[in-house]
């Protein structure tokens, strides 16, 4: 049974952020494998995009390191082909594997069970034919539980395909329903739409859900819940809330890794996505600005004044949170957790903080005296600047935000320099040195004599 069931994507990060730094046991030897199925050519109600969706998803998964069962997507599968593929795929799984099962096509819920419809659906005339001529999705979870692998089940299969009851009743629901996860299974289940909703087949090459997921997987080193945040709110916004991708999960003592391993703090962020202004505040994914949150990129310990070229720290700007929630003191959009923590004492000397980015950014500091210091950059992209000279010594939490809501988190650089150098830069002197390309990518430590602790720590977004 699911430990936590039916959670919308916006609720998951509260739980999963605690788990962000954990990896699967035995991950070094584990495989990343995927089974991708796309069915379009239904006899009764053909679809446009599932074959395209499956082809593009298979290509993306291969790009990020997954081995595909069958060496590619399985298209236009009849019932027996689906049964054999799922059986043989799950037989290849081992404890510690990350197994993605992606299905695009018709899917229905009948008497509380979700069924995936094969293309040989000629025999499905009434709702009570569905169990005999379709694949029960819970069966995949049962097979998964026996393997010790962690599953990511992606169901772009909530199309509306109403079937009459032989007796005139109504036992078939709209869309798919939550699934009970068998004991021992570790699975994340991504639905294209919430219970009671159907998913759009789309007007372009891909369905709306899969199109958003393909874009999100362009940055695959993020946590699975971060990926789903982005997908959910892109689709929610595009449909005005008529379709909301949905995520449920269960634990069996193991936590799935990111879709792609790597140095996640450069590519993992609470993806800032556009939440339409017309939507009620309650539908937005933010969980509040957390002054006590773990810094996503680390703690900066000052062992001495910054070098002449300044300390350059790369990050992704922005997030879900509208900083106007701070009683109107600040503006822009930031992440819940701070990006960095800076420990400052007067012995270090006056310093200045500014940002550099291709887009307009904001800068927020929460000081040891529990007050906020905020500034917004110029609308033309000029970076914001904040000075620390007469402030209270101690730890400062730092957020780099965006001036407006954005779909993709823009790269930015937080620059920390002595106040005298910052003043010279503002006046034009030394600007060429501080903005030289060879200085923009510097991070910390070896080259500068400063220390950034836990840059990819447990709070990495």
Image (tube, rainbow, N blue to C red):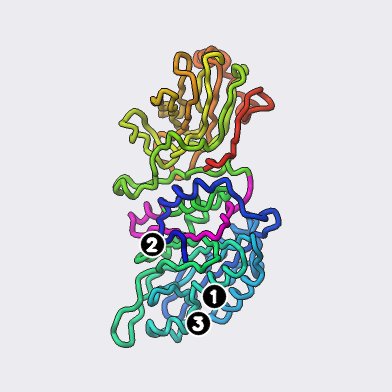
Decide: few, some or many residues near mark 1? Use Cα within 10 Å; few <14, some 14-19, many ≥20. Answer: many
- Front: mark 1 or 2: 2
Q: Spatial distance from mark 3 to mark 2, Cα to Cα? A: 27 Å
Q: Quadrant of residue 98?
A: bottom right
Q: Name the residue under label 3.
A: 120
Q: Which mark is residue 26?
A: none
Q: Residue 76 carries which label?
A: 1
> Sequence-wise, which precedes: disc 3 or disc 1?
1
Residue 58: percent from left, percent from top: 59, 62
**109 relative to 424, above or below:** below
Residue closer to the observer: 456 or 103: 456
Q: Spatial distance from mark 1 to mark 2, Cα to Cα? A: 25 Å
User: What residue appears at the point 44 percent right and 27 percent down from the top-left corner?
Assistant: 365
User: What segment is highlighted magenta in the picture?
Assistant: 233-262
Q: Which mark is residue 194?
A: 2
Magenta stretch: dominant SS? loop
């Amino acid at each position: 049974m699911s430990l936590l069931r039916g959670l919308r994507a916006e609720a998951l990060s509260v739980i999963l952020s605690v788990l962000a730094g954990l990896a699967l046991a035995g991950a070094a030897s584990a495989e990343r494998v995927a089974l991708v199925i796309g069915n379009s050519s239904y006899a009764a109600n053909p679809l446009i995009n599932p074959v395209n969706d499956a082809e593009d998803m298979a290509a993306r998964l291969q790009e990020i390191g997954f081995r595909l069962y069958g060496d590619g997507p399985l298209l236009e599968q009849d019932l027996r082909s689906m049964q054999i593929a799922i059986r043989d795929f799950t037989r290849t799984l081992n404890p510690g594997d990350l197994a993605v099962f992606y299905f695009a096509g018709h899917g229905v819920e009948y008497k509380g069970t979700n069924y995936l419809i094969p293309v040989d659906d000629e025999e499905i005339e009434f709702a009570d034919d569905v169990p005999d001529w379709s694949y029960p999705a819970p069966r995949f979870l049962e097979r998964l539980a026996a393997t010790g692998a962690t599953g990511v089940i992606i169901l772009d299969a909530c199309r509306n395909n109403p079937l009459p009851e032989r007796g005139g009743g109504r036992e078939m629901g709209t869309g798919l329903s939550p699934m009970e996860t068998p004991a021992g299974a570790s699975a994340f289940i991504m639905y294209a739409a919430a219970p009671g909703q159907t998913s759009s087949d789309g007007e372009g090459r891909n369905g709306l859900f899969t199109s958003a997921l393909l874009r999100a997987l362009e940055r695959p080193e993020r946590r699975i819940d971060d990926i789903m945040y982005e997908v959910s709110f892109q689709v929610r916004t595009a449909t005005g809330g008529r379709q909301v991708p949905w995520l449920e999960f269960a634990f069996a003592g193991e936590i799935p890794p990111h879709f792609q391993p790597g140095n996640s703090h450069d590519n993992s962020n609470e993806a800032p996505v556009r939440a339409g202004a017309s939507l009620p505040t309650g539908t937005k994914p933010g969980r509040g600005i957390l002054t006590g949150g773990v810094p996503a990129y680390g703690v900066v310990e000052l062992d001495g004044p910054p070098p002449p070229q300044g300390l350059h720290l790369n990050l992704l700007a922005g997030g879900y949170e509208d900083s106007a929630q701070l009683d109107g003191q600040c503006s822009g959009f930031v992440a819940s957790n701070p990006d960095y923590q800076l420990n400052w004492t007067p012995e270090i000397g006056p310093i200045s903080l500014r940002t550099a980015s291709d887009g307009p950014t904001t800068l927020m500091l929460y000081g040891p005296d529990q007050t906020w210091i905020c500034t917004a950059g110029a609308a033309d992209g000029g970076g914001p600047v904040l000075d620390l000279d007469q402030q209270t010594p101690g730890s400062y939490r730092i957020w780099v935000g965006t001036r407006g809501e954005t779909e993709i988190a823009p790269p930015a650089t937080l620059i920390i320099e002595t106040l005298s150098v910052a003043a010279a830069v503002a006046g034009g002197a030394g600007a060429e040195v501080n903005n030289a390309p060879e200085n923009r990518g510097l991070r910390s430590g070896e080259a500068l004599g400063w220390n950034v602790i836990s840059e990819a720590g447990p709070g990495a977004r």
